[in-house]
Each structure stands twice: as structure tokens, then as C-alpha cells.
Image: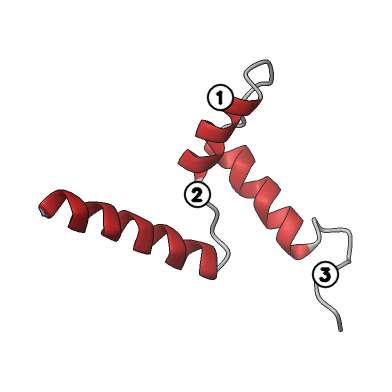
Amino acid sequence: MFEKLSEAGRYLGQTMRLMVGLPEYSTYVTHMENTHPDQEVMSYEEFFRERQDARYGGGNGKFGRCC
């Protein structure tokens, strides 16, 4: 029972982070290891910066929104 609660808590935490735009680094690492084993995995800092740039326009003056 505690195992299921713990798992539900992890999913809830991941869902809440994604709702506010904070992608999960561990999910990225698992994906890269399973899907792209020949490519280098970004460090947490590189991953965070890349995700911020993708969300907010990467400092090029363009924002990812409609207005």
C-alpha cells in the first residue's frame, strides 16, 4: 500500500512540475539512455538552460506565445 502511495506521489510531483514548466531531468536522462545511447547526455545545468531557452525564446527576443 505504501509503495502505491509513494508511486502516486512521484507522479503527482512530476505532473505539478510539468504544469509549471519544469521538465524532469531524470526522465530526460532515461529517454536519452534508452533511445539515443550514442549521444551525450546534457548536464543538469545544460538541460535546464536548454529548456528555459526553448520556453522563453532563448534570448533572441522572440517569446513562445501568441501575442
Quadrant of the snapshot with the N terminus: bottom left
Helix, strand or loop at label 1? It is: helix
**Circle 1 Cα neighbour tier, 10 Å, few/some/many (<14 / 14–19 / ≥20):** some
**Residue that numbered label 1 is attached to:** 33
Upstream in sequence: badge 2 or badge 3: 2
Q: Quadrant of residue 12?
A: bottom left
In front: label 1 or label 2: 1
**Is residue 64 rendered to the left or right of residue 35?**
right
Q: Quadrant of residue 47?
A: top right
**Is residue 57 rendered to the left or right of residue 39?**
right
| In the image, farthest residue toward the top | 38
The amino acid pointed to by label 1 is Glu
Residue 24: mark: 2
Q: Report the Cα–Cα distance between label 1 and label 3.
A: 31 Å
Upstream in sequence: badge 1 or badge 2: 2
Which residue is at 72% across, 61% downward?
55
Helix, strand or loop at label 2? It is: loop
The correct choice, above or below, for 37 with respect to 66 in the image is above
Quadrant of the snapshot with the C terminus: bottom right
Which residue is at 53% across, 38% downward?
44
Question: Residue 16 appears at what percent x and percent y?
Answer: 44, 67
Q: Report the Cα–Cα distance between label 2 and label 3.
A: 22 Å
Which residue is at 66% across, 51% downward?
51
The amino acid pointed to by label 2 is Glu
